[in-house]
Image (tube, helix red, strand yellow):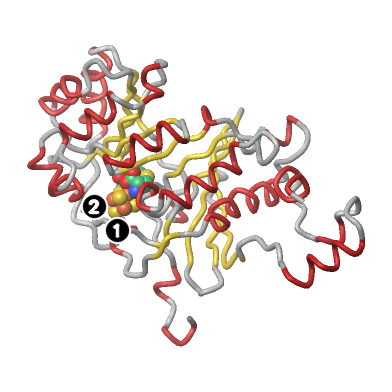
């Protein structure tokens, strides 16, 4: 069963012909194997796809696929909405919140594999090579389900995507960072976004509970770091808020000694947001300072903006449906 479902993606019990007919019938009487229902599938001009998934209780979450010439990255959600309220993030304004079950998380990957035809031959598998937990929700606030789902995703007899190709992004839930490193060993991305507690308290309010010093210590202690696996520091570029040259220098001072790369995220606007994206020049200057200090610094080019699929733009349309439709 495990092989049929996770390695081959077969959900029809009748097709599992090496199981006895009797067993298949008994299973069919008691269980169903289903992928999340797709309420909406959109494709952006740049090939990015977004699926809005509708779960049994009518809650919804989004999954995004970002194709690149030699690989494909799937951005999956761990919660419906998010309980945290980062000032620049659309997801954080969503009212409905619940944890996704492990099946709902792994179902996102299986659904994308089906839709992309990403199983079997190496050439097909190249369409979905990497996974980032960077969709809706804070994955470390749903750790047990994320752990169970990643177990299936990373298992060589299951879906079989290596931990070195999976990145979990967190706003900084310090106590869970260590567990994640020890039990899952996936790559870590930290939503840093500010270099002083004063500003980070405002932009990423969980900082009031787990301030920068504790967060950076958790990064230094992250097991994969000891094997020289780099941590990604994500830094959203907000015009005249956190994007100055002094901040860039302070950033390099803060992360000194941590094997790291820095990923600048141009702010993606959404209706009602109070911020603007930094200018191209400010982003270049910031990146140059970080690079001069010896770190790789990339600017994450927004993908799928025209279908609100870019970072921080996810917020399910389910919220906008009238109550009677729920
Ligand atoms: N909750 C986790 C996972 C989400 S990852 C986390 O916060 O890390 C999504 C990334 O996009 C995070 O780094 C998040 O801070 C960033 N982000 C949120 N809103 C954004 C916006 N409007 N523009 C650009 N990046 C944004
Ligand atoms: Fe939640 Fe991450 Fe958005 Fe913050 S940035 S509100 S933690 S999804």
Badge 2 density bin: few <14, some 14–19, many ≥20, Cα 10 Å:
many
Residue 270: percent from left, percent from top: 31, 57
Identify the disc placed on residue 192. none
Q: Position of residue 78 (x, y in %)?
A: 45, 53
Q: Is 49 situated above or below 38?
A: above
**10 Å neighbourhood of mark 1: few (<14), some, or many (≥20)?**
many
Residue under circle 1? Answer: 92
Residue at disc 1, CB closer than 8 Å to ligand 2: yes
**Secondary element at image label 2:** loop
In the displayed structure image, the side of residue 267 where residue 205 appears, left or right = left
Q: Residue at x 51, y 49 (%)?
A: 64
Q: Is residue 303 left or right of residue 41?
A: left
Q: Position of residue 249 (x, y in %)?
A: 15, 21
How far apart, in angstroms, are the residues tagged by discs 2 and 1?
A: 6 Å
Mark 2 vs ligand 2: CB below 8 Å:
yes
The answer to whether residue 190 is left or right of residue 112 is left
Q: Residue at x 49, y 83 (%)?
A: 325
Give the label on residue 86, or none: 2
Is residue 205 visible in this depiction of the protein?
yes
Q: Nearer the viewer, residue 125 or 27?
A: 27
Q: At numbered mark 1, what does the secondary structure look like: helix, strand or loop?
A: helix
- Tell me if I can see residue 268 in this picture: no
**Quadrant housing residue 217:** top left
- Asked if labels 1 and 2 touch by Cβ distance under 8 angstroms, the answer is yes
Q: Residue at 15% across / 31% down in the picture?
A: 213
Which residue occupies the foreground of this view, 21 or 149?
21
Residue at 66 percent of width and 41 percent of height: 159
Find residue 38 and report its horizontal and vertical position in percent.
60, 64
């Amino acid at each position: 069963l495990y092989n049929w479902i996770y390695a081959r993606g077969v959900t029809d019990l009748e097709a599992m012909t090496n199981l006895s007919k009797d067993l298949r019938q008994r299973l069919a009487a008691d269980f169903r194997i289903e992928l999340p229902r797709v309420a909406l599938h959109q494709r952006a001009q740049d090939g990015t796809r977004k699926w809005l998934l509708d779960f049994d209780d009518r809650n919804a979450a989004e999954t995004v696929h970002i194709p690149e010439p030699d690989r494909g990255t799937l951005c999956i959600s761990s919660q419906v909405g998010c309980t945290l309220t980062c000032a620049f993030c659309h997801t954080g304004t969503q009212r409905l919140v619940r944890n996704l079950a492990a099946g709902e998380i792994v179902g996102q990957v299986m659904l994308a594999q089906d839709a992309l035809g990403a199983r079997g031959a190496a050439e097909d598998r190249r369409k979905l090579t990497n996974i980032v937990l960077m969709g809706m929700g804070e994955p470390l606030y749903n750790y047990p389900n994320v752990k169970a789902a990643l177990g299936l995703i990373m298992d060589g007899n299951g879906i079989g995507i290596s931990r070195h190709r999976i990145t979990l992004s967190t706003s900084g839930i310090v106590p869970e960072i260590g567990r994640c490193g020890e039990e899952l060993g996936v790559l870590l991305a930290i939503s840093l976004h500010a270099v002083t507690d004063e500003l980070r308290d405002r932009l990423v309010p969980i900082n009031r509970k787990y301030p920068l010093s504790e967060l950076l210590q958790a990064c230094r202690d992250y097991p994969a770091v000891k094997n020289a696996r780099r941590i990604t520091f994500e830094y959203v570029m907000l015009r005249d808020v956190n994007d100055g040259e002094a901040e860039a220098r302070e950033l390099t001072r803060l992360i000194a000694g941590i094997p790291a790369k820095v990923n600048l995220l141009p702010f993606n606007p959404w209706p009602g947001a109070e911020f603007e994206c930094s200018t191209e020049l400010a982003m270049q200057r910031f990146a140059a300072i970080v690079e001069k200090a010896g770190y790789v610094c990339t600017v994450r080019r927004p993908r799928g903006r025209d279908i609100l699929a870019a970072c921080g733009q996810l917020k399910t349309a389910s919220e906008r449906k009238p109550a009677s439709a729920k």
